[in-house]
Amino acid sequence: MPPMKGRVAFIFDEVNFDVDQIVGVKNIKITDVAELAQVAMQAYDPDFAKSVRPGDLLVGADNFGYGHPHYPPMKAMRHLGVTGVIAESFSPGYWRGEVSMGFPQVSCPGILGFVQRWDEIEVDWAAGVVRNHTQGTEIPFEPLPQADAEMIEAGGLVPFLKRQAAQQREQKDHAHVPGI
């Protein structure tokens, strides 16, 4: 996978952070992603939508995504240009849901003490490190399970399954020898 490069757009330092708070529980049923993006982060930084740039990343504490896994908050983040989340650790339900959507998640113990908001960082998948270009440092992250890496690289569960099915068809076609 190509490295993710961007700024730390926000740091959620609350343990067991429920991502529903990003858009507010009262807005969780909004289906229009542009409308969700307008309400995103209002409780944390009313100027967030104006400040975030494509490629920016979010940083979180332990058990990021705790609670019922809902997709609208992170859909709003993707719509605003956020390309992934780096956290101390993740709630399993949140992790599975977002990886299935093709949204990169990086489990990186120590990340909260490693970055400050707006630092320029890079996730180097091949080297297994997060680089802080602002501070000139790097920290290792936990490697992704192969299936998760492939799912993120494919763009989510559905494209991943389609890719696998195509590969299986191709293998089957090559295994068939005509005339025998």
Image (spheres, rainbow, N blue to C red):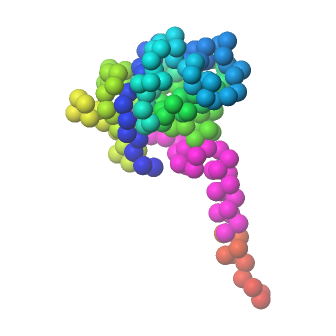
Q: Is residue 158 above or below residue 84?
A: below
Residue at horizontal 41 percent and vertical 41 percent from the top? 4
Quarter of the image with the C terminus in it = bottom right
Spot the residue most to the left: 136
Give the image quarter of residue 121: top left
Residue at 77% of width from left, 89% of height from top? 179
Please tell me which residue lies in front, 153 or 120: 120
Which residue is found at the position 55% from the left and 44% from the top?
A: 152
Main SS, magenta region, reads helix
Q: Is residue 66 left or right of residue 82?
A: right
Image side of residue 145 versus residue 93, left or right: left
**Residue 17 shown in magenta:** no
Farthest residue to the bottom: give it.
179
Q: Is residue 147 visible?
A: no
The stretch drawn in magenta includes residue 162: yes
Q: Whole-percent x and y of residue 80? A: 51, 31
Work out whether residue 180 or residue 72 is closer to the camera in this orientation and state it. 72
Q: Seen in the image, is 33 located left or right of residue 60?
A: right
Residue 77 seen in this snapshot: yes
Residue 9 in picture, x, y percent from top left:
41, 25
Point out residue 165 in the picture as x, y percentages from the top left corner.
69, 58
Residue 162 lies, in percent from the top left, at 68, 54
Depth order, front residue of 87/54: 54
Extreme residue in the right direction: 179
Q: Residue at x 66, y 69 (%)?
A: 171
Residue 11: quarter of image = top left
How many numbered badges does the structure rendering display? 0
Q: Which residues are magenta?
A: 141-170
Say if 39 sits above or below 167 in the image. Answer: above
Quick check: 27 left or right of 117?
right
Vertical relation: 173 (above or below) 112: below
